[in-house]
Image (cartoon, rainbow, N blue to C red):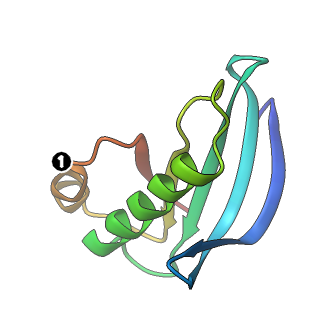
Amino acid sequence: MGKGFSFIGNQHRLVVDEDEFFIDLLFYNRILKCLRSAEAVAFELKKGKFRPQDAGQLNFYLNVLNDTERQPDENPAIGIVLCKEKNEKTVEYAFQQISNPMGVAVY
């Protein structure tokens, strides 16, 4: 993962209107900006090819994290979809109007 990452947990539970959602992996990074500005990094793991709905799911998770768990002195959460393969144009269109910092990586 690199320097400054701390593992928070897997299947990190979020509750919205009594519904449960689970982020596959959640990390915390203490040095992306400075020691007081820490960021959460949420990973969604996908067994297959990236699909546009993966961006929507991760965007939802980031919105919830930023609203319910982020401290006032922290930066917004970052999201990464980790998938087996991706089509660049599909990724481009899926993220076109999303303002949360997100990306797609292949394994």
Residue 25 sits above or below residue 19 on the image: above
- The image shows residue 48 at horizontal and vertical percentages of 44, 80
- Which is nearer the eye, 62 or 105? 62
Residue that carries the numbered disc 1 in the rendered image: 96
Which residue does the image show at 59% across and 59% down from the upper left? 43
Which residue does the image show at 50% across and 78% down from the upper left? 17
- The image shows residue 12 at horizontal and vertical percentages of 71, 69
Residue found farthest to the front? 17
- Which is nearer the eye, 99 or 1? 99
Apparent side of residue 93 relative to residue 26 in the rendered image (left or right): left
- The image shows residue 61 at horizontal and vertical percentages of 50, 62
In the picture, which quadrant includes the N terminus? top right
- Which is nearer the eye, 68 or 3? 68
Residue found farthest to the top? 34
- The image shows residue 36 at horizontal and vertical percentages of 76, 19
Secondary structure under the numbered disc 1 in the rendered image: loop
Apparent side of residue 88 relative to residue 72 in the rendered image (left or right): left
Q: Residues within 10 Å of mark 1 (few under 14, many from 20)?
A: few
Q: Would residue 1 be visible to someone looking at this image?
A: no
Residue type at mark 1 is Gln
Which residue does the image show at 22% across and 59% down from the upper left? 94
Which residue does the image show at 63% across and 29% down from the upper left? 72
Apparent side of residue 54 relative to residue 67 in the rendered image (left or right): left
Total numbered badges shown on the rendered structure: 1
